[in-house]
């Protein structure tokens, strides 16, 4: 039965993701500029970009199919729904029992399939190249992400993210070796899935190296705005998954409405620290060749599997 408080918590989770995702991207861009001793863009630059794109006309290729037109809405909807499953402010989420961690990975995979199909729909060389690279990254990153989620689910005996958060919060503060391996693997997967250095450079437009930008070359106007907003939402979703798995303290429990008031500033602090660390990782790393990406993601998968084996052997 969906309670009124649960409905409010679910609505707040989705609205918060939609509102904060561009802000998180803007914060990371600011930190990157500061670390490079450059003049930093405005924290609200992403909002201005989205506002400008939503007011521009969408130009479509002559042979664009309905798939190309509908893909931005489907991708945006899938990522938004994924954000609704992840506990950010509260564990009282009515959508959570209907979709566990496996369904979360499935939603992210569905968004990837549609954005790749749309990139190949026009038939340009760069779009097809970007789609192939995106599917390669997904083929290697999704199993690693599943192993990370399974490592946490083995400790808590549940694949529901809300149950994982509730269980970890009530456990004694301790270092779990399995979660330590899973944390490193998750960081590597998150960098790859969000097209960040060392897998991809979000600031480049060099056709031979880019992945994310190649998928969006033929989009403009509101379609491009939805795709860019979805990319920010995906980064926000992965950040919140990391918080839920490795730093769940501060997330309000079900039946505690007053805890929601303190959950928001705690979440903002965690996202700010995570964004700064992400910018630091990018500044201390070099963009690797595309042929090295499989090795990078294979290492992430092996680390996640080692985390699961450590749990079976040590029970921690």
Image: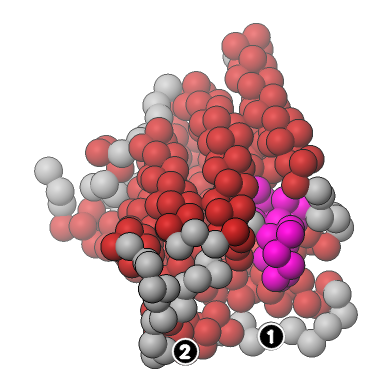
Identify the residue shown where x is 85% and y is 55%.
Answer: 286
Q: Is residue 290 left or right of residue 10?
A: right
At x 61%, y 82%, the residue is 43
Q: Residue 89 occupies which quadrant of the picture? A: bottom left
- Work out whether residue 139 can be spotted: yes
What secondary structure is the stretch in magenta mostly built from? Answer: loop
Locate the C terminus by quadrant: top right
Q: Count the marks: how many? A: 2
Which residue is the site of mark 1?
41
Above or below, comparing residue 49 to residue 150 in the picture: below
| Mark drawn on residue 52 | 2
Rendered image quadrant of residue 308: top right
Q: Is residue 128 left or right of residue 219?
A: right
Q: Which residues are magenta?
A: 191-210
- Tell me where residue 19 appears, x and y as whole percent: 42, 73
Mark 1 / mark 2, whichever is N-terminal: 1
Looking at the image, residue 170 lies above or below residue 268: above
* Residue 60, percent from left and from top: 40, 76
């Amino acid at each position: 039965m969906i309670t009124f408080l649960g409905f409010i918590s679910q609505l707040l989770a989705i609205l918060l993701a939609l509102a904060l995702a561009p802000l998180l991207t803007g914060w990371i861009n600011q930190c990157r500029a500061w670390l490079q001793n450059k003049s930093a863009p405005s924290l609200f630059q992403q909002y201005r970009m989205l506002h400008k794109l939503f007011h521009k006309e969408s130009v479509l290729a002559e042979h664009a199919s309905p798939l190309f037109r509908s893909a931005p809405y489907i991708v945006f909807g899938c990522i938004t729904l994924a954000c609704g499953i992840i506990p950010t402010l509260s564990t009282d989420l009515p959508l959570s029992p209907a979709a566990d961690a496996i369904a979360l990975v499935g939603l992210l995979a569905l968004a990837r399939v549609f954005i790749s199909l749309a990139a190949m729909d026009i038939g340009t060389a760069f779009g097809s190249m970007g789609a192939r690279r995106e599917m390669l990254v997904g083929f290697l990153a999704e199993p690693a992400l599943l192993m990370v989620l399974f490592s946490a689910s083995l400790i808590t005996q549940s694949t529901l993210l809300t149950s994982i958060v509730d269980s970890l919060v009530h456990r004694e503060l301790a270092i779990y070796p399995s979660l330590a391996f899973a944390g490193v693997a998750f960081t590597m997967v998150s960098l790859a899935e969000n097209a960040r250095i060392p897998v991809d450079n979000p600031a480049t437009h060099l056709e031979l190296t880019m992945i994310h930008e190649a998928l969006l070359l033929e989009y403009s106007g509101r379609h491009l705005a939805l795709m860019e907003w979805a990319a920010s939402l995906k980064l926000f979703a992965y950040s919140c998954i990391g918080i839920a798995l490795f730093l769940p303290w501060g997330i309000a429990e079900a039946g505690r409405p007053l805890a929601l008031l303190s959950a928001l500033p705690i979440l903002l602090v965690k996202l700010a620290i995570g964004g700064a660390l992400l910018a630091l990782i990018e500044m201390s790393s070099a963009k690797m060749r595309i042929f090295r990406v499989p090795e990078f993601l294979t290492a992430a998968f092996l680390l996640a599997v080692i985390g699961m084996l450590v749990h079976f052997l040590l029970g921690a």
